[in-house]
Every structure is written in C-alpha cells, then in structure tokens.
Image (tube, rainbow, N blue to C red):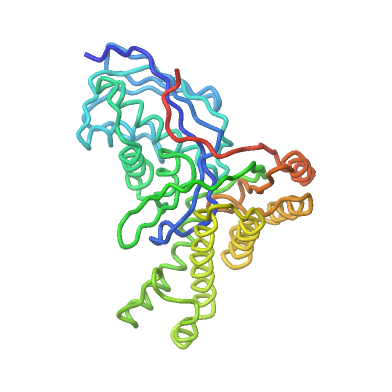
Amino acid sequence: MNTFNKISVSAPGRICLFGEHQDYLNLPVIAAAINRRITVIAHKRNDPIMHFQLPDIHEEDSFHVSKHVEYIKERDYLRSAVNIVQRYGYTISHGADFTVTGTIPINSGTSSSTALVVALTDMIIRLNEKNKHVPPEEIAKLAHLAEVVEFGEPGGMMDHYTTAIGGVIFLSMYPELNIEKLRPHLGSFVLGDSGEPKNTMVILAKVKRRIEKTVYQLSHLYENFSLQTVSLSEIDTFKKDLEKDQIDILTATLQNRDITGEAKEICTAKSLDHEKFGELLYKHHVILSKELHISTAKIDRMIGAALKAGAYGAKINGSGGGGCMFAYAPGKAEQVAEAIAKEGGKCYIINVDQGLRVER
C-alpha cells in the first residue's frame, strides 16, 4: 500500500517564444516554462472520493472514482485526468483531498489549465503507484490527452511538454515528435496581462480552419506539398489556385515557421544575441497581429510601450484575442513593467523555470 499520505506537486505556466499557432500544424515551436506555477497538495483518503478545493476561483468539486467518471461540464479536466490515467494502465486505488492554488494568470494564454492538468496527472499517479516517478514526457502525453484530445479541442502539444519538462524547449512534430532542450542564457521577461478575456478555443479553431483549408486544397493540387518543406519563394506558384486570404495566411504561416528556425540558431549559439532575439520576437508579433489578427489594440499598445521603455522585443502570448503579452527586458524589467502598467496591463517580472517538481 502507498505509504505517502500527503504530497505536493507544482507545474509552471509557459510563454510561447516562437511558433505561435504552429504546433497544431506539425510545425516547430520554441517555448519556455516560467516561474509562476500551479500547486496541488493532496492528502490520501481511505475511500474512492476525489475532493477538490480551488480557493483562487472560489470553487470546490467532488466525485467518486469509477472505471469511467462521467463529465458534468465542458472541459471537465479534474475528471478527465482521472479517466485518462486509468485508461492508460495506471491504477487508482483510493481518493484524496486536493487543494489547488496558483500564481499563473487565469484565462490569459499562459497555460494555467495545462499546468493544472499536468500537476494533477503526475499527482494521481504518485499517490496510487507508490510515489512512482513517471518521465515528464509521459505526463505531458497523458495531460494532452486529458485536456485536448478527450474533448475534441483544436490545440497542440506545446503547452503540455513545456510545462512538464520545463526550461526552454524546441518542439518539432515532423517527421516525428522531437523535443530538444535549449539552454540560452535568457534574462528577465515582463509578463503583461491585458485583463481582456479571451476565448482560446474560438480563436484556435478560427485560425486553424483558415490554414487547414488552404493546406487541404494545395495538397490535392500538388502531390508533394508540405508546410514543413515548402519555401516562401514558392508561394507565387500557388497564386492562381488560391484566394488572397489564403495566400496571406499561407505566407504568414511560412514566415513564422522560418522565424522559429532563425530563433533556434540564436538560442543554440555559444553566446546569446539578446538584440536579435528581441527583434525576432517582435517580428513574430507583427505577423500575428497584422496577418493572423489575433492581437488586440490594447495589447499592441502595451507592446509599443514596452519597446519604447527599452525592451529588446515583445509579442502576444498564447492563442490571442486578449490575455497576455510579454517583453524581453533583461536589466530593464522594472522600467518596462511600469510602462506596460501605464497602458493598463497587470505586470509580473518572470524568468525561465523548471518543469514539474515535487514540493518538499
């Protein structure tokens, strides 16, 4: 029997440095875990009841563990984590009393829900498998199934692998999943929460539909067409086959893909070029704002203020339509935070952090 009666696990939020709206297209991304986290504390019970206290959002929930726990709401992550853990071969022999707290801005594009699902997935396995250590890549896979696949959502795997593994990672899905840990010597960032509510699933689905329609059309016209291999210089070839809107989103997608490739070279160099790193962040943002239309006027103003205050670069974070932006501002974080705050943003000075960890 498991002798661990209490355990505490935490998982970080994340920022997408490069490759926003790319992972679900099997294109590469570079993302970083941040030092704002979700913490789950659990006390083992002697019955099969899962009871959750979520004081940050003034909610609580309880359910009885069964072979399949029925969902009672959209994106019922507490129950889906239990279902996925069981479905993939782990035993849940007893319940627990959970307390969930966090410092990640909620519904802001910094992966608070993913951090919850990752931490909870790891926690459930540890409590029921004699504190068994499961590799973070396995936890990420299970969490992605619980949060995205289980509910037919359009998101990719970037959030789950970044949150579970931590640090800065390069994630590519073509021709197969590959995760590379990068170790650029990054300084401080400033995370700015616009306070504008966002609808992640609506934005994700809208952008995804636009590019997938274009890819589907070109794949049927050109046998060897692939987003992974087509070059920007080939776009003129497709103008006779596509509407202007399709050409625009294809161009934006390939530009963002190539920016991510440039950024990887910078992040793997012996010495980090902070200025070039920042330039690429902002170049990426301009495409997201002007071509993919996922930014807002307020977030654009916050980014402009950050750049004027001395940030090397800045971009919107997450699916868009509201939520957060971040600025890369080593040595000037306080000044940049003040400038963003004047535009109405709630600011947090953040740094790259580790992934899943057991708290002692």
| Total numbered badges shown on the rendered structure | 0
Residue 326: image location, x then y, percent: 64, 47
Residue 3: image location, x then y, percent: 28, 11
Residue 1: image location, x then y, percent: 21, 13
Where the C terminus falls, by quadrant?
A: top left
Judging depth in this view, the residue of 35 and 202 nearest the camera is 35
User: Which residue is painted at 48% across and 35% down in the image?
Assistant: 354
**251 vs 323: above or below:** below
User: Which residue is painted at 43% across and 28% down in the image?
Assistant: 357
Judging depth in this view, the residue of 56 and 7 nearest the camera is 7
Judging depth in this view, the residue of 113 and 287 nearest the camera is 287
Residue 237: image location, x then y, percent: 45, 86
In the picture as drawn, the residue positioned furthest to the bottom comes out as: 240
User: Which residue is painted at 51% across and 40% down in the image?
Assistant: 33
What is the quadrant of residue 65 in the picture? top left
* 319 sits to left or right of 224: right
**149 vs 263: above or below:** above
User: Which residue is painted at 44% across and 24% down in the image?
Assistant: 40
In the picture as drawn, the residue positioned furthest to the front comes out as: 270
* 32 sits to left or right of 295: left
**299 vs 244: above or below:** above
**257 vs 62: above or below:** below
